[in-house]
Image (spheres, rainbow, N blue to C red):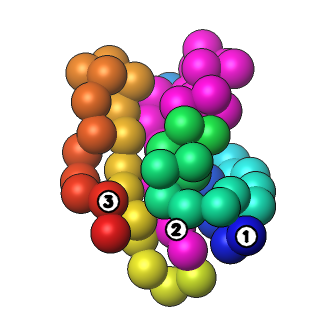
Amino acid sequence: MRAYTFYFADRLSPVESFDIAECKDDAEALERASELLGREPERVAVEVWHGAQQIFAFERDCNRQMSGVG
């Protein structure tokens, strides 16, 4: 398992929120990011990091991954 940090952009607040979760791989982290983004309607985007490496970013509005996994 690997620790991933999920940073959320919020349309109601200039301060990003974050969550940390253990996932077995990047694909599971992508699923988790989508789930976490969907929980709160004010969240508009998420960036997922493993340590100092950004794994991907995802925007709710266009419902597509914004940068490549890996």
- Name the residue located 31 percent from the left edge and 22 percent from the top edge: 63
Is residue 21 depicted above or below 1 in this figure? Answer: above
Label 2 crowding class (10 Å Cα cut-off): few <14, some 14-19, many 20+? some
Q: CA distance from mark 1 to mark 3?
A: 17 Å
**Residue beneath label 3, please?**
69
Q: CA distance from mark 1 to mark 2?
A: 14 Å
Q: CA distance from mark 2 to mark 3?
A: 10 Å
In the image shown, does 63 or 25 lie closer to the viewer?
25
Is residue 41 one of those drawn in magenta? yes
- Which label's residue is closer to the chain start, 1 or 3? 1
Instruction: Name the secondary structure under disc 1.
Output: loop
Query: Magenta segment, which residues?
Result: 34-50
- Name the residue located 62 percent from the left edge and 28 percent from the top edge: 35
- Name the residue located 44 percent from the left edge and 37 percent from the top edge: 45
Q: Is residue 40 left or right of residue 22?
A: left
Q: Quadrant of residue 42?
A: top right
Label 3 crowding class (10 Å Cα cut-off): few <14, some 14-19, many 20+? some
Is residue 49 depicted above or below 60 in this figure? Answer: below
Instruction: Name the secondary structure under disc 3.
Output: loop
Marks 2 and 1: in contact by CB < 8 Å? no
Instruction: Name the secondary structure under disc 2.
Output: strand
x, y percent for residue 21: 76, 56
Badge 1 amino acid: Met
Is residue 13 depicted above or below 23 in this figure? Answer: above
**Residue beneath label 2, please?**
49
Q: Nearer the viewer, mark 2 or mark 3?
A: 3
In the image shown, does 29 or 67 lie closer to the viewer?
29
Q: Quadrant of the N terminus?
A: bottom right
Badge 2 amino acid: Trp
- Name the residue located 27 percent from the left edge and 30 percent from the top edge: 64
Mark seen at residue 1: 1
